[in-house]
């Protein structure tokens, strides 16, 4: 693959590389522990440092089983906390976040991989896996996703108003020509809007009951009936609502909105005869989480408090965002568009290798910073004279 599409000086969207600052952390540890510590930082930030290789190179099947394990742990801890009550309820904070993360990873990585044929080679097995997962987390089936994602998002509709995700943003009021502050108000209002959640849930219901094949419809009805019987038999309605429905509906849908609002620079048309790869990379960037290290010239209590704050922000702000908004390979989404058939299970490391080889990738540090940059650009675009898309088929798939 050739990467000489943009001048090298345009290959960064930041004035500093946050991850390279972290590359020296743990250097005083034994070599194996130092590598483990750096792998931990790479997992949280979503970005390796220069020359870093995976500590263990996992494949798609490894990710599949690890994600199911995380889902089981998240739900189990939630149920345990609900049954024990009192201070055990504090466990719901990490357990619900873990459940949302696992559901999102199943959708954004495992199902996504089946659509592009990168999970396993067999189309039949890919379809079975995708339909089983989407049945479990109550998302649209394989056939619907394939048309919306592969057919449109990876086709000529990419980032235009014909792209399903761009249609969703437009329908909920985030449109070109609006003031930046108004775009943020609209975004935050939508995140907690009953209309947004009802629309998203209605799409999931439609695609599972009205648009599905007869076999899919039968499967949905059978699984639904068995779920109701088990919940009634064991009087587990409350635990089910807290441990599964809240993360699956509210958590999943908020994470989807935050993700696709910063995933691309939407509402743009490619010029005639423009290079497709160049176009993909111009409208997509890597999204990473992390903060600059404290100033090395600090001393005493100032240094101690600065490092305490750095670790607190990393573990209690950046880590939850990484888990729920940009799980798995999502930080390297630009690399995915440049290498659709690539190894998504190790995409963040492969992206770094491509970057060092000259790939003109850009990057943003901060999930909400990526949205802010998009809103900045959106505010400078002329309004689009299109009718309201409130009644359009909104995919809201955010892949």
Image (cartoon, rainbow, N blue to C red):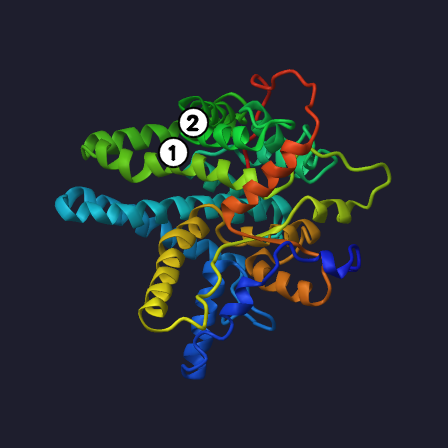
Which residue is depicted at the point 33% across and 64% down? Answer: 305
Q: Which residue is mark 2?
A: 197
Q: Is residue 137 above or below residue 168?
A: below
Q: Is residue 278 above or below residue 244?
A: below
Q: Is residue 134 above or below residue 328?
A: above
Where does the image place residue 241, in percent across and percent down from the top left? 28, 33
Q: Is residue 147 something that shows in the picture?
A: no
Contact? badges 1 and 2 (CB < 8 Å): yes
Q: Is residue 122 something that shows in the picture?
A: yes
Where is the C terminus found, in terms of image quarters?
A: top right
Which residue is depicted at the point 68% across and 28% down? Answer: 162
Tell me the quarter of the picture where residue 179 sits: top right
**Mark 2 secondary-structure assignment:** helix
Where is the N terminus found, in terms of image quarters?
A: bottom right
Q: Which residue is mark 1?
A: 250
Question: Of residues 122 and 206, which is closer to you in this image?
Answer: 206
Horizontally, residue 345 falls left or right of residue 70, namely: right
């Amino acid at each position: 693959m050739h990467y000489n599409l943009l001048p090298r000086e345009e290959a960064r969207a930041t004035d500093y590389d946050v991850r390279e600052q972290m590359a020296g952390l743990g250097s005083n540890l034994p070599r194996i522990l130092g590598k483990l510590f750096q792998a931990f930082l790479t997992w949280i930030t979503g970005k390796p440092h220069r020359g870093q290789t995976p500590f263990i190179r996992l494949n798609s099947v490894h990710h599949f089983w690890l994600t199911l394990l995380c889902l089981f742990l998240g739900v189990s801890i939630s149920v345990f906390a609900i049954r024990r009550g009192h201070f055990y309820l504090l466990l719901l904070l990490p357990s619900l976040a873990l459940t949302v993360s696992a559901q999102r990873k199943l959708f954004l990585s495992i199902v996504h991989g089946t659509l592009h044929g990168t999970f396993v080679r067999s189309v039949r097995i890919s379809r079975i896996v995708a339909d089983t997962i989407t049945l479990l987390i109550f998302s649209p089936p394989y056939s619907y996703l394939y048309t919306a994602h592969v057919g449109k998002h990876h086709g000529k509709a990419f980032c235009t108003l014909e792209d399903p995700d761009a249609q969703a943003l437009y329908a909920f009021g985030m449109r070109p020509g609006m003031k930046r502050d108004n775009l943020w108000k609209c975004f935050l209002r939508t995140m907690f809007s009953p209309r947004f959640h009802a629309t998203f849930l209605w799409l999931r219901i439609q695609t599972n009951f009205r648009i599905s094949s007869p076999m899919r419809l039968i499967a949905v009805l059978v699984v639904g009936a068995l779920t109701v019987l088990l919940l009634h038999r064991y009087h587990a309605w409350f635990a089910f609502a807290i441990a599964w429905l809240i993360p699956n509906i509210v958590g999943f849908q908020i994470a989807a909105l935050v993700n696709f609002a910063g995933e691309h620079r939407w509402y743009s048309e490619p010029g005639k005869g423009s290079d497709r790869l160049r176009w993909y990379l111009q409208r997509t960037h890597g999204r990473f989480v992390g903060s600059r290290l404290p100033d090395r010239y600090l001393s005493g209590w100032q240094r101690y408090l600065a490092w305490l704050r750095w670790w607190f922000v990393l573990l209690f702000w950046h880590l939850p965002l990484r888990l729920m908004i940009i799980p798995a390979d999502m930080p390297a989404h630009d690399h995915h568009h440049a290498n659709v058939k690539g190894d998504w299970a190790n995409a963040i490391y492969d992206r770094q290798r491509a970057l060092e080889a000259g790939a003109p990738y850009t990057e943003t540090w901060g999930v909400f910073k990526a949205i802010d940059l998009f809103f900045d650009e959106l505010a400078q675009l002329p309004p689009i004279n299109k009718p309201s898309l409130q009644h359009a088929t909104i995919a809201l798939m955010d892949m």
